[in-house]
Image (cartoon, rainbow, N blue to C red):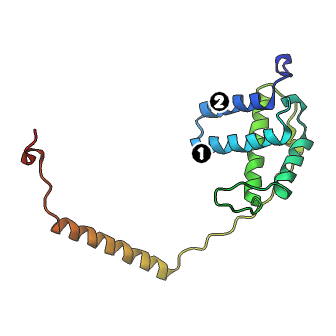
């Protein structure tokens, strides 16, 4: 590990990671998600030096998210985080700690011993033939209405007819 990074706080590393991801070209929404998840991790650990973080801290954080964390949603829904959300947090942490290791801030891959959370993807039911026919009929009705409105609406004034130049 580079000696000048020994006292590097988690928040400082998160700032560097965020800048790296901006340069990489991530979407604003993905960046916002990374920042929110890493901020929660910082708060949970009370912003320690990056070098002091262990795989056990990461496991404890993921356990806390799954068992004790109470989400503060705008909707007021206090249900626990979904398994997919826990997995997304794991992906964020994996990306962050991989970046920290490749950047020389850490010697070891802290995520190597942190198990990837499992989640199931519910299959999306395809539309029935009847539902497809209803969608096509609705589309045709909208198209017919648009055509009728074009035929019955008065022509727009051209700029020279308005009296303004």
Residue 121: x percent and y percent?
70, 64
Residue 22: x percent and y percent?
61, 33
160 lies above or below 10: below
Question: For the point 7% across and 48% down, which residue is it?
Answer: 161
Q: Quadrant of residue 47?
A: top right
Task: Look at the numbered discs 2 and 1 and tell me whether their residues touch, using CB distance below 8 Å.
Answer: no
Q: Quadrant of residue 100?
A: top right
Label 2 Cα crowd, 10 Å radius (few <14 / some 14-19 / many 20+): few
| Residue named by callout 1 | 29
Residue 35: x percent and y percent?
69, 40
Depth order, front residue of 93/107:
93
Q: Which mark is residue 94?
A: none
Label 1 Cα crowd, 10 Å radius (few <14 / some 14-19 / many 20+): few
Q: Which mark is residue 19?
A: 2
Give the quadrant of the C terminus: top left
| Left or right, residue 62 beside residue 77 | right
Question: For the point 86% across and 44% down, which residue is it?
Answer: 58
């Amino acid at each position: 590990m580079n000696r000048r990074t020994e006292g590097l706080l988690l928040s400082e590393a998160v700032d560097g990671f965020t800048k790296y991801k901006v340069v990489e070209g991530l979407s604003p929404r993905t960046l916002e998600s990374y920042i929110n998840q890493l901020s929660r991790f910082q708060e949970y650990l009370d912003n320690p030096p990056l070098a002091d973080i262990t795989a056990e801290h990461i496991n404890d954080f993921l356990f806390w998210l799954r068992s004790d964390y109470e989400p503060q949603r705008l909707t007021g829904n206090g249900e626990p985080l979904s398994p997919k959300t826990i997995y997304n947090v794991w992906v964020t942490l994996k990306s962050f700690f991989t970046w920290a290791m490749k950047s020389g801030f850490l010697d070891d891959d802290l995520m190597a011993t942190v198990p990837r959370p499992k989640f199931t993807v519910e299959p999306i039911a395809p539309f029935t033939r009847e539902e497809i026919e209803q969608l096509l009929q609705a589309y045709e009705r909208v198209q017919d209405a648009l055509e009728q409105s074009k035929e019955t609406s008065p022509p727009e004034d051209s700029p020279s007819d308005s009296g303004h130049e």
